[in-house]
Amino acid sequence: MLISRYGYVGLTLALALGIVGVPVPDEALLTYSGYLVGNGTLLVPFVILCAFLGAAVGISASYVIGFRLGLPFLLKYGPRIRLSAAKIERAQSWMNRYGNVLLFAGFFVPGLRHLTAYMAGISRLKKRTFMLYAYSGALVWSTLFIYIGYLLGDQWQTVKTYIHHNGLTLVLIICSCAFVILCFRLFIAMRKVKA
């Protein structure tokens, strides 16, 4: 593993690449780091700092790619895959409304964390809003999995197995919650219009 060979720098680099979309087992990397903290190989403040920096660099790079390249690409090639300008505009509006929650919570769902920053950039989500929610999500996510690895010790790999087998379930739960919130807001808005 990169951490065993390159230590803190390896952790930062691997997480940055993983968040951008390179197939890196992010949770396994973090729990392994927690395990190394527990056995005294690494120091907890440096592990948390490097994990946060890696996640922050990765998600920022994804945002910039989405911001600079995403919208023109979608407007040019979107109609070929049935993404009209109206659909793209609706997706942007939806991201502007709920993107902050997705940026924070997306870290906890494999696959979703890779897409939220691209979508935030494509949707032109304000940079301050992006930074607040994405960076706080990165800090909570990385610290939590490092702590889990610390607690599990030699059993740190169980997290990788659990996430692999239950990742789809987590995505479905989050999508269901988002749908319920959206329906509730629509119901409230319709009641106000009738009143």
Image (tube, rainbow, N blue to C red):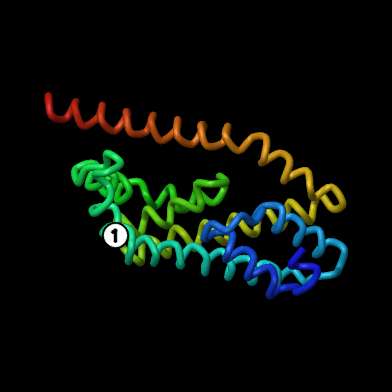
* Residue at x-position 46% and y-position 67%: 61
Secondary structure found at label 1? loop
Q: Is residue 84 left or right of residue 194?
A: right
* Residue at x-position 57% and y-position 47%: 108
The kind of residue tagged 1 is Arg
The part of the image, by quadrant, that contains residue 2 is bottom right
In the image, is residue 180 above or below residue 25?
A: above
Instruction: Tell me the quarter of the image containing the N terminus.
Output: bottom right
Q: Give the class, few, some or many, for how many residues have Cα within 10 Å of label 1's Cα (few <14, many ≥20).
A: many
Q: Position of residue 34 (x, y in %)?
A: 76, 59
How many marks are shown on the rendered structure? Answer: 1
Q: As rendered, which of 188 and 92 lies closer to the eye?
A: 92
Q: Position of residue 193 (x, y in %)?
A: 13, 29
In the image, is residue 183 above or below residue 85?
A: above
Q: Position of residue 18 (x, y in %)?
A: 59, 59
* Residue at x-position 20% and y-position 46%: 85
Instruction: Tell me the quarter of the image containing the C terminus.
Output: top left
In the picture of the structure, the residue carrying the numbered disc 1 is 124
In the image, is residue 6 above or below residue 15?
A: below
Residue furthest front as drawn: 80
Q: Position of residue 40 (x, y in %)?
A: 86, 68
Q: As rendered, which of 185 and 65 lies closer to the eye?
A: 65
* Residue at x-position 56% and y-position 64%: 55
Q: As rendered, which of 59 and 18 lies closer to the eye?
A: 18
Q: Is residue 167 left or right of residue 147?
A: left
Q: As rendered, which of 63 and 135 lies closer to the eye?
A: 63
Q: Is residue 156 left or right of residue 113?
A: right
